[in-house]
Amino acid sequence: MPELPEVAYQKKYADATILHKKIVKVETGDKKIYQSAKKEFEETLAKNQITGSERLGKYLFLNLEKNGGLVIHFGMTGKLEYYQHDEIPKYAQLTLTFEDNSRVSFTCPRKFGKLYLAESLAEFQKDNDLGIDALALTKEQFLEILDGKTGTIKGLLMNQKLIAGIGNLYADEVLFQSKVHPTTKVNQLSDQEKTEIFKEIEEVLEVVKEARIEGDKLPESYLTTARKKGAACPRNNGKIEQIKVSGRTTYFCPVCQKEKS
DNA sequence: GCAGCTGTTAGTGG
DNA sequence: CCCACTAACAGCTG
């Protein structure tokens, strides 16, 4: 469930299901998910209630009536499941039972997710050295982040300490839409390319976020729909190639996204 | 059976 | 310090 658009969907799901309900029971799972003692989570959550939510990058902050909030990172496979029955879902790592007998579970099969307690999202951001949310980023901030960097543009886009919210899939999408090759060094980008990438960060994330929330498919002009080696480029220009960049499998169209010499 | 995967982190090395 | 790469985590899918 992981990049910004999917977390935005989880936020909407949480807002629609679990706000303003008194927590009467807390059940915790594997210790490795919990970034402080499970006992602290139990004590903080019991008899408390979630009063609102905020998102930063790939993190969801559930604001509690008392004692700060619960922060969720979804890893690769985490999600929230709200239900009215007694059967706790497989892979539940945290289950809250509310006064009306409904429940929410944070499920996470691969256990790459993480749960934290924090005073506020701003404090969490600071403590964890997280960058600016990709959808809150201004062009000035973006240009400042690019300034002086020597690595690949794809590596930069995925660096959560610089910009929070973009992962492997949508980094590729932003670069495909911007017609920039993923291994292009940041200091080789023209001003025009920088402007284009900035615009596409917002465009791609908004489009995908809306699609996720509405349950719609992504536009056919998106690389994400053709993310496979040898697939036809969505602009019909070439065949999609697969390489490794910053340690991650990367798809791009060699015709649309020319490598700089 | 095996590789690969929307994420992060520790370790290595340039 | 910056950056790239690898392995590891754990379960499912093709």
Image: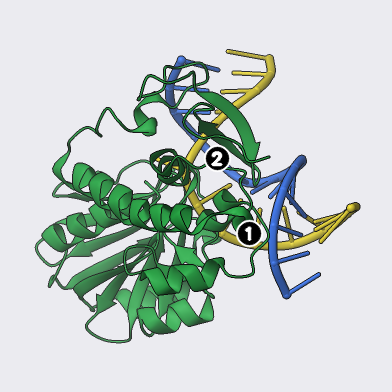
Chain colours: A green, B yellow, C blue
Q: How many marks?
A: 2
Q: Residue at x 24, y 52 (%)?
A: A9
Labelled disc at residue A68: none
Element carrying mark 2: loop
Figure check: C5 above or below A41: above
Asked if B6 appears above or below A136 in the picture, the reply is: above
Q: Is residue A166 visible?
A: no
> Do residues under tags 1 and 2 come within 8 Å of each other at their CB atoms?
no
Residue reaching furthest to the left: A100
Q: Residue A125: x, y in percent?
A: 45, 77
Q: Chain of mark 1?
A: A
- In the figure, residue B4 lies in which quadrant? top right
Q: Position of residue A220 (x, y in %)?
A: 27, 27
Q: Position of residue A154 (x, y in %)?
A: 55, 49
Residue A216 vs residue A107, the one in the foreground = A216
How far across and how far down the image is residue A121, in percent?
36, 78
Image height of A68 relative to A193, above or below = below
Q: Is residue B1 left or right of residue A203?
A: right
10 Å crowding of disc 1: few (<14), some (14-19), many (20+): some
Labels 1, 2: one chain: yes
Give whichever of A129, A83 is nearer the camera.
A129
- Label 1 residue SS: helix
Figure quadrant of the C terminus of chain A: top right
Classify residue A50 as left or right of residue A229. left
Q: Is residue A15 visible?
A: yes
Three-letter amino acid code at the position of disc 2 = His
* A260 left or right, relative to A209: right
**Residue plotted at (61% across, 37% down):** A259
Q: Badge 2 is on which residue? A: A181
Could you say which disc has been placed on residue A187 in the image?
A: 1
- Identify the amino acid type marked 1: Asn
